[in-house]
Amino acid sequence: MIDGQAVLGATAMLSSDIDIWLMIVPGLLIGLTAGAIAGLSNSMAMAICLPLTLYMDFLPAVMFLTAIFTGSGFGGAITSILMGIPGTTSAVATTFDGYPMARAGRHNEALGVALLSSTIATLYGYVVLFLLVGPLGAWVIRLAAAEMLLVALWGLSMIAVLGGNNAIKGLLAGGFGLLLGTIGMNTSGYIRGTMDIPFLLDGIPLVPAMMGMFAASQLLALVGTRFLVTEEENRRADYRKIMAGCMEVLRRPVAHFKGSMLGVFIGAIPGVGSSVGNLVSYAEMKRNDDDPDSYGKGNPKGVMAAESANSSSEGGSMVTMLALGIPGGGGTAMLLAAFTMHNVTGGPQFINDNMDIVYTIIFGNFVQAALLLVLGLGFLAVAGNIVRIPVTILIPAVLVLAVLGSFAITGDKAGPITLFVFAALGWVMKRYDYPVAATVIGLLLGRMVESELIRTWQVSGGMELAYFAERPVAITFAVLLVLSLMQPLIKRRLKQRRLSRAEP
Amino acid sequence: MILAIRHKMTGLTAVALGCAALLGAPALAQEFPDQPITMVVPAGTGGSNDRAARLISGFLSEELGQPISVINRPGGGNLLGHLYFQQQPADGYTILRTTAIPYMTVNMLVQGAEFDITDFKPINLGDIDTSVIAVAEDSEFATIDDLLAEIRENPGTVSIGVQPTSADMINFLIFLEALGLSEDDVRVVTFDSGGPVRNGIAGAQFDAGVIGERGLRPMAEQVNTLMVFAAEPLDVWDAPAVREVTEAEGVADYPNILSGSVRGYFVHGNLEEEYPERYQRLVDAFKAVSESEEAIAAHNEQQITIDWYGPEESTEIMLREHENLTNPEYLNVLKPE
């Protein structure tokens, strides 16, 4: 599956053009900054920089854009950890343990975990792309509504994980989110719950709603405190602690690998992508753990699960773009636009004729991953200072940025309005102790679950079993999903048996 | 603020124009445009309208001597972008690139938008799509006859991927009805936009798809087109035209073939009346670009169509297809009960 000739061609191409390398550092820095600003997503940063690439050659242009992609993958973790507000949908699960760690003064460690998880996972993502670009692309596009539905449900199972002590409140909050997710015009043309507000036809703007809910619940909880981190000596950027965080990842190569692989394969499915990947990975990590109760309170493994999955999904999302010319999400749509600007069309023809270019992009991204580690360390020294800002200044600053970010997303007042409405909702939920995150996940996945359920119903002629009998992949996914949900039960049973055997 | 200044400027220019007309000095009329022009795309970046808008704006700005900035206002089946365009002043400084049919019709009749289709004046609808029935390259259905045979033998088992609010859907239902079949004899699988339908065809996620043929062209290797909804077969696809198929099936006269998506460039409906010179200037610029060899070559390279029909014929096409869609018989297809 690896084309030796093309590998040689790619190395020749990489060593011949210095421009390819010069584009990586600025790209990564733009990505890191954009990712760290709540509301600026990777695709938006790429869209802003797209016109610049017109003046570059094709390979430097692609390298520049993929560097933004890579940088923002990690940049998103910074707001998630330091402020508990995910700037993008793919960093939701990072907040669950990252923010509690920061509040406990372990932000250096959490950022270290996130940085190394992201770096290695980006590498894994591109290794998979390198090995499997053709076959994986052909496989992924065959996943139909039934399979997509199961993947979305897998992500949704996260809601059950979130409930914590009050499972009923978790389920209620999740169900409420799912209902909110059905607002708008659905896939068969029915319009529901839009209250005659035009922008709701497309559903509730996800990122402003998500930022509003998280911001309200996290920032309002800070009222009365003076700093994010209570102990003064913990507020400094401490490289030893960042390194300790990095070591956490190296000590758990298997768990990290699993999270990364989930990210790649889920990220490769067009229209699903990294926003589901990080949730599935987190839920899997927690269910698998001997001590699931430690999650959500500052367990570095939770940060690792989320960050490995959202970073490796970059490689995954490139699969369909390169192999089939189909963008899987916003970021790859921008890359594809850059391709067309340079009169290059992705697709089977492209990878048959230009495997050396594909490999050049992949190898260039290996280098990006390595450089991300270096630049990321430097970036953390600056970003880590957020914990030294008094809360009285931090909260208004974050709110202003969130309002601007939400405006940037929708381009009109719809974004800020959504932000405020959901901030109010988030505050009420927090006040009565409902998990805000469960509603956010319901909202994120509601539309996907509904659309795929409708299509599965339609294509199977009203859920006729004969249809599913011919879809072995769907059956496998379903079995895996059930097994994964039963895992805590099985584990408990085994433990009891072991205990009862040990006692007499 | 900027808008206010623009209004003031246009007021002054109008006075100046009036004086110029009295003095018999038509040269001043050529001064439009004297500031950058905005082209609204009611869809996201990277889609067919966006790519076309960005491509033509380079040539157009050379022609008009002012830069053209493309802005995206996606959402609600182009509705949000259409509303945005209507909120801008009708002074010729905002133009629109969109898929007029079926979206304007659907906006009006299904989504309850308060504009009328005549609030949009087409300058050129140079990109008219054709609905086709297509399957995955390795599908068991090699011809349209195979597909029809299966639909007749096992009614209600063949799945068809389609956008529910589209001319493709209506074309397909007219076709079924002409053959004595109905919607209930197939499993209609609905999608929000064309991209997932095309992916689904290539990935055999359903048995066959009905979709515009333009977007399928870059995927020609992964799909096989079984039939085209046109009077005559098309050069690009090796597939029979719908009338050939229905004639072979013994259907004497086929009721109606609808165009697929109709895309192109628009100004405000009252621009021609308010600023006839500006309107003419824009029409001339579009015509010059549509007939320039360089622009045509660039469009061909990206597989974007740029035929010149002009405002009159374009308006005719738009109104005709709008009428077709608003036919009460078809409208209930678009409008869920």
Image (tube, rainbow, N blue to C red):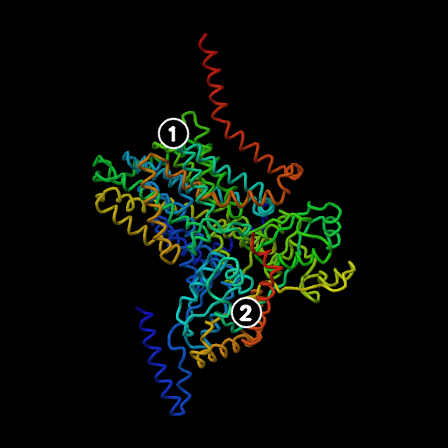
- The residue wearing badge 2 is B298
Residue A213 seen anywhere in this rendered image of the structure: yes
Residue highlighted by disc 1: A166
Select label 2 or label 1 by which is in front: 1
Q: Chain of mark 2?
A: B
Q: Residues within 10 Å of mark 2 (few under 14, many from 20)?
A: some
> Quick one: quadrant of the N terminus of chain A?
top right
Residue at the top extreme, as displayed: A504
Q: Quadrant of residue B72?
A: bottom left
Q: Position of residue B113 (x, y in %)?
A: 47, 61
Task: Identify the element where label 2 is drawn.
Answer: helix
Identify whether B24 is placed above or below B70. below
Q: Report x, y in % for residue A90.
A: 42, 44
| B238 over A80 or under it: above or below | below
Residue type beneath disc 1:
Asn
Label 1 SS = loop
Q: Quadrant of residue B83?
A: bottom left
Query: CA–CA distance between discs 2 and 1?
Result: 61 Å
Name the amino acid type tagged 2. Answer: Ala
Q: Out of A178 and A404, give the one closest to the viewer.
A: A178
**Label 1 Cα crowd, 10 Å radius (few <14 / some 14-19 / many 20+):** few
Q: Foreground residue, A24 or B56? A: B56
Q: Position of residue B84 (x, y in %)?
A: 42, 63
How many numbered dots are placed on residues in this image?
A: 2
In the rendered structure, the residue with mark 1 lies on which chain? A
Going by the image, does A267 lie left or right of B200? left
